Amino acid sequence: MATAVATGPLDAHLEPAQRELLARCERLARERFAPLAAAHEAAGEGSRLDRELVGALAAEGLFERLYRRGEDRSWSAVVGAMDLCLIREGLARASTAAETAFGLQGLGSYPILQSGTAAVIERWVPRLASGEAVAAFALSEPDAGSDVARLSLRAERDGTGYRLSGEKVWISNAPEADLYAVFARTTAGAGARGLTGFAVARESPGLSGEPLEMISPHPIGRLVFDHVHVPAEAVLGEVDRGMSVAMRTLDLFRPSVGAFAIGMAEAALALAVAHAGEREAFGGRLKDLQAVSHRLADVATRVQAARLLVHDAARSFDLGLRPIGQVAAMAKLMATEVAQEAVDAAVQVLGARALERGHPLEHLYRDVRAPRIYEGASEVQREIISRALFAEGGRR
């Protein structure tokens, strides 16, 4: 998708193994995953689940970075927040489609791995790890996006389990995912305290869905639950404690949304720098125009600052420093907002060619918008940060 993003002094805070992981993911994305994704989109399948790409991610061992089976045959989560950020940043530098497929597999499967019963884990995690099956995280509803306390999908006891009735929307990988981590209301009027997580298979009777067309080609859709039966063993964690199941996953993955954004920003910046260094204009090169060079200098500075904030949030998670909500919110907020700025600046430097259908920046311009909304919109992140500030009485 873009010129390779060089590593160097700006990676001095990373360990050698971390720099190697970042470089490997970027190389795989550029050489193997990006051509697969391009062929998928060229065939008019950009809004469909790309199982060939998922299989390629598995074949290269990237899903093994999420979870693996131990010598005792049990499955466990193995990825740390920092490694997760580096993988997503590296992939996003060269293939947003590969990054998205990787991130969604982790987001959808982690509630299963961390809170599922032994029977559910044994049935699904081997297939998820191999890329045979694809997972999805089903939280949002038509009237409940960032405000999860308003979730209304009902889960009613029926003697042998539960019956789910209602709707989910804007669910990535829907309606084609094989397994959904679904969050439904088990206690009316209890807000976020009355939610329960469930593992729901796509073939469950009464479950249907349809794809949605978005501004950027992406597998996403609507799910309708018509008294879908799920057995008691499909409950994730404890009844009425589903919010904690969801938040344990989001605490890990939210900083890495910032890493995804940073990868896109770095790709856009690399394209702009390359173009400004080659393009002749006004008797010289674009880079000789102070308005251009200083704009790119400002963007580069802000991208690196946001990147360091993302990495700091990831380290805080890995070190068990709690609560991490404030720094994770800061990281996601700044990274996604800066990425939007970086891509826009790159488009301005390249001009009309950057808006031609199929140009890498045209693709990034559409892809960069969504991360400011999902997994907590920028306004929600600001609310989290401000609440933490006032709870501390302004102390830092």
Image (tube, rainbow, N blue to C red):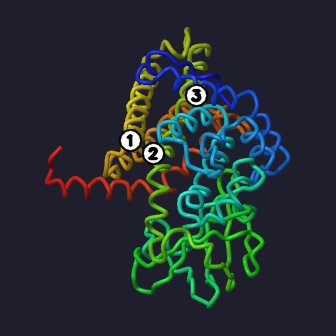
Q: Nearer the viewer, residue 278 or 201?
A: 201
Residue under circle 2?
Answer: 255
Question: Which residue corresponds to the image point at 67% horizontal and 25% vertical from the top-left?
Answer: 27
Residue under circle 3?
Answer: 21
| Amino acid at dot 1 | Ala
Q: Picture coordinates of residue 115 (x, y %)?
A: 53, 63
State the residue lying farthest toward the front: 72
Mark 2 is surrounded, within 10 Å at the Cα level, by few (under 14), some (14 to 19) or many (20 or more) other residues, namely: many
**Of tags 2 and 3, which is closer to the observer?**
3
User: The N terminus lies in which quarter of the figure?
Assistant: top right
Which quadrant of the view contains residue 127? bottom right
Query: Which labelled disc corresponds to residue 84?
Result: none
Residue under circle 1?
Answer: 313
| Amino acid at dot 2 | Pro
Q: Are marks 1 and 2 in contact (CB under 8 Å)?
A: yes
Distance between the alpha carbons at the discs numbered 2 and 3 = 18 Å
Q: Nearer the viewer, residue 3 or 150?
A: 150
Mark 1 is surrounded, within 10 Å at the Cα level, by few (under 14), some (14 to 19) or many (20 or more) other residues, namely: many
Question: Which residue corresponds to the image point at 40% horizontal and 47% vertical from the top-left?
Answer: 333
Mark 3 is surrounded, within 10 Å at the Cα level, by few (under 14), some (14 to 19) or many (20 or more) other residues, namely: some
State the residue lying farthest toward the bottom: 159
Sequence-wise first label, 1 or 2: 2
